[in-house]
Amino acid sequence: MKGFIQEFKQFAMRGNVVDMAVGIIIGGAFGKIVSSVVADIIMPPIGLLVGGVNFTDLKVTLKKAVIENGTEIVPAVTVNYGNFIQTTLDFIIIAMAIFLLIKGINAFNKKKKEEPAAPAAPPADIQLLTEIRDLLKKEK
């Protein structure tokens, strides 16, 4: 049992797993920010432009709710296409942000690869032979 726990700990603390966990947490928070931007900033002006429509209210009712004595017994069956439009815009914005991030990372890595590496020093025996050759040239 102790070996299993040690192996799991070693797996969980590997750099890739920790990096992935941090990415998921940040991605979740980023998704909430994008959802808020779409719902609270982008969609209201668009709704205003198309006649004061709130996109989250857009739906098609397939079956009306059953109400008795002011109490809803069976809820309405609706297709909420307004929420779908809003979620689609969320996705497009997140996808664009990730695309731009990956594009920036790739451009940075490309510049990094293009930098010429310093030539490696020759082995010690080659350096010694070069020095001997240079000394012999000076004596001539």
Image: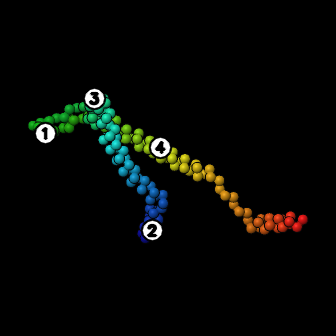
The image position of residue 109, as x and y in percent, is 56, 50
Query: Which residue is identified by label 3?
Result: 51
Say few, some or many: other residues with alpha carbon within 10 Å of mark 4 (under 14 / 14 to 19 / 20 or more): few
Determine the residue located farthest toward the bottom in the rendered image: 2
Task: Please name the residue shown 37% across and 38% down the image.
Answer: 89
Mark 3, mark 1: which one is toward the viewer? 3
Pointer 2 or 4: first along the chain: 2
Determine the residue located farthest toward the left in the rendered image: 69
Which amino acid does the dot numbered 3 rest on? Gly
Q: Secondary structure at mark 4?
A: helix
Q: For this view, does 114 lie left or right of residue 16?
A: right
Task: Please name the residue shown 45% across and 68% down the image.
Answer: 6
Q: Quadrant of the N terminus?
A: bottom left
Q: CA distance from mark 2 to mark 4?
A: 38 Å
Which amino acid does the dot numbered 2 rest on? Gln
Residue 59, placed above or below residue 102 = above
Q: For this view, does 64 lie left or right of residue 128?
A: left
Determine the residue located farthest toward the top in the rendered image: 51
Residue 82, picture quadrant: top left
Q: CA distance from mark 3 to mark 4?
A: 33 Å
Query: Which residue is identified by label 2?
Result: 6
Residue 79 shows up from this direction: no
Task: Please name the residue shown 13% across and 39% down the image.
Answer: 71
Which amino acid does the dot numbered 4 rest on? Phe
Pointer 1 or 2: first along the chain: 2
Query: Which residue is identified by label 4?
Result: 99
Pointer 3 or 1: first along the chain: 3
Q: For this view, does 2 lie left or right of residue 138?
A: left
Q: CA distance from mark 3 to mark 1?
A: 32 Å
Query: Which residue is identified by label 1?
Result: 71
